[in-house]
Image (cartoon, helix red, strand yellow):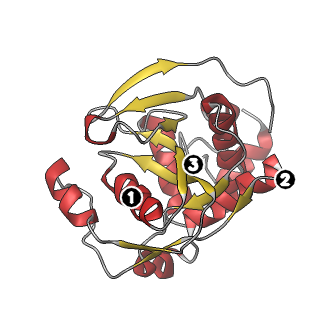
Amino acid sequence: MKWVNVAAELFLGATCSGCQAPSLRLCSRCAAKLVAQPMLIRRPSCEWLETWVGATYEAEIARIILAWKDGVATQLTRPLARSLAVVICGSGFGPSTLVPVPSDPRAVRRRGFDHTASLAKAVSKLMGAPWVTRKLLSHRGAAVDQVGLTWAQRLRNAEGRYLAAVGAEPVILVDDVVTTGATLDEAANMLCSSGHQVVGAVCLAHTPKRLNFGKTLPQSGRNY
């Protein structure tokens, strides 16, 4: 263990967001776990929406995403963006506008930042032109927190949640974690009804107990 990490915990209380080991940043083991292995998610409820993820939402990955999402470790935006860029390259999606799935305004105020918007912007910056990020979705109103809801309850909770700006561009939805996919389904439907071509969706991770996934692809040769 490096002395600087010991000192970080002793004097600053700094720990790795993934494993809680003394560290000023992600430890090398947890950083390695963020190297995405793009996976295609298959969901019977919405076969047309091609959804790709980079990891399984468990253990260190879950703790890293939670620490970032809750505003405790916003410095993780860039490494998470690199992981999502690998997912996009592995998906085979062509250049498109990245559209973050909007967080509840109350959650944004509580956290102090909009995590999905920050993630999408960081990804488009890494990938460069013609990749851009646009906020084409907004919340119609307050929604019930989805934690603990069943698939059917999540579908009902997501109905009518978003408003979409009118347009006609190819878009890719960006979110942090996909569980049942109800949120992605509703967001994609709203974008389609507003004239956009929804190419697919990309997420950092998926919860394995609720979803079936297909193949795992080799890591993209492009580095971010």
The three-letter code of the residue at mark 2 reads Ala
Q: Quadrant of residue 47?
A: top left
> Above or below — where is 29 with respect to 185?
above
Percent x, y for residue 137? 50, 71
Q: Is residue 201 above or below residue 143?
A: above
Q: Find disc 1 in the rendering and name its residue.
A: 189
Q: Nearer the viewer, residue 13 or 97?
A: 97
Quadrant for the N terminus, please. top right
Q: Secondary structure at mark 3?
A: loop
* Among the two numbered marks 3 and 2 on one chain, the one whose residue lies closer to the N terminus: 3
Crowding at mark 3 (Cα within 10 Å: few <14, some 14-19, many 20+) = many
For the point 79% across and 45% down, which residue is it? 4
Q: CA distance from mark 3 to mark 2?
A: 32 Å
Q: Amino acid at mark 1?
A: Asn
Which residue is more in the foreground, 30 or 44?
44
Query: x, y (%) of residue 158?
Result: 28, 64
User: Which of pointers 1 and 2 lies earlier in the amino acid sequence?
Assistant: 2
Question: In front: 141, or 74?
Answer: 141
Any part of residue 13 in sight: no
The residue tagged 3 is 17
How many numbered markers are drawn?
A: 3
Q: In percent of the image, x 34 and y 47: which residue is there?
A: 181
Q: According to the image, label 2 marks what residue?
A: 129
